Image (cartoon, helix red, strand yellow):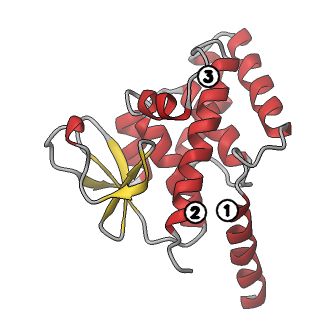
Amino acid sequence: MPQNKQIVADLYRSFTTYWGMFNVKMNRATPQTLPEAAYSINQGDCGVAAISVYSVLKRLRYDVTMISSERHALLEIDNLFFDTECPTGADVVPARHGPNPYLPQSIDDMIDGYMPCDSHGAHLMQGWLGLFDIPIPAKLQHAIDNAEQYETVEVKAMFDETIEKLAAMDSLFLKPTSVFHALLRVDQEETVAQ
């Protein structure tokens, strides 16, 4: 499948919108504009964003690499760098993320480095990936199945309720048409190949 950069941008905008709505509903943030939310994500949830968007792009058969330094995680596609603040790609990693070398990372490496016991991030990722019928990475399932080890029962209930409410929303910002059309094409190709 050709690597449509608009789909990458749509996914990052969808994730950023979902992140903002999820955190407001969880009482962990005040409402933010899309650029404000994109900036906030890159202050601690860049790994969650990278793993999430990467998971959908891999399902779409994109040639994408997750890369990270000690301070930031992002995606590289066709020598362009993507994150929530650069959803259409940039030729260089923004300087504010530091000159550290960026190295390719596996999903497990990214989880270990950015969300080793992040129940909040795992639930957020589960909800967003669920919009596209894509499961969360297996290594994060423990944070979902054993949320009581990380969160109170009340917070776990809030996670589940928030995911349910956001899944019920009919929003093109959360569920971009371009992504669903691309996923449908991949499903059709796989059906024909069988």
Q: Which residue is mark 1?
A: 179
- Label 2 residue SS: helix
Could you tell me how far apart the alpha carbons at marks 1 and 3 are, in whole angstroms?
Answer: 23 Å
State if disc 1 and disc 2 touch (CB < 8 Å): yes
Side of 139 where 156 appears, left or right: right
Query: Residue 118: x percent and y percent?
Result: 50, 27
Residue drawn 60% across the image and 69% down it: 60
Q: Which residue is mark 3?
A: 23
Residue drawn 50% across the image and 71% down it: 62
Amino acid type at image mark 1: Val
Q: Which residue is mark 2?
A: 7
Amino acid type at image mark 3: Asn
Position of residue 7 relative to residue 78, above or below, is: above
Could you tell me how far apart the alpha carbons at marks 2 and 1 are, in whole angstroms?
Answer: 6 Å
Give the quarter of the image for residue 188.
bottom right
Amino acid type at image mark 2: Ile
State if disc 3 and disc 1 touch (CB < 8 Å): no
Task: Inspect this view and state whether residue 61 appears.
Answer: yes
